[in-house]
Image: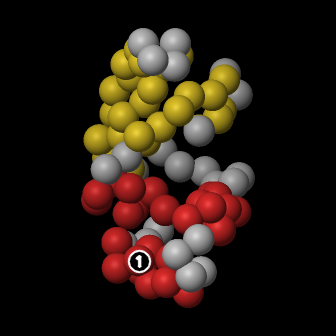
Amino acid sequence: MVKDGTGSVKVTAFRDAAEKFIGKDTEEVINLLGELQGNESALVEKLKKSLVGAKIALLGRVSYDDFSDDLRFTVDSIM
């Protein structure tokens, strides 16, 4: 979820964009997950803490998600 002064939107980022978004490459995330004994919820919380309040510029496209009845932003690149 990304928020700005106008609202919020769910964000999807894949591989390179996701790595840049969270500031860790795939290997680092796998190692961190190992340190957390495979606890995915703890991993998400740890990553979330590092991102809350961060300023970021994203380029991508918005689409309507029929399943959740809301908008989703798919990241193409991060500035």
- Give the residue drawn at x 44%, y 84%: 31
Q: Is residue 79 above or below residue 45?
A: above
Quick one: quadrant of the N terminus? top right
**Residue type, label 1:** Ile
Residue 64 locus on image (x, y percent): 41, 14
- Give the residue drawn at x 47%, y 37%: 11
* Front in this rendered view, residue 18 or 31: 31
Classify residue 35 by image quadrant: bottom right
What is the basis of the colouring in this image? secondary structure
Classify residue 51 by image quadrant: bottom right
**Left or right: 68, with 30 as reference point:** right
Q: Secondary structure at mark 1?
A: helix
* Front in this rendered view, residue 77 or 14: 14
Q: Is residue 52 above or below residue 43?
A: above
- Mark 1 crowd level (few <14, some 14–19, many ≥20, 10 Å Cα): some
Residue 24 locus on image (x, y percent): 43, 72
Q: Is residue 20 above or below residue 56?
A: below
* Front in this rendered view, residue 69 or 40: 40
Q: Is residue 4 above or below residue 24?
A: above
Residue bearing mark 1: 30
**Left or right: 4, with 22 as reference point:** right
- Give the residue drawn at x 38%, y 63%: 19
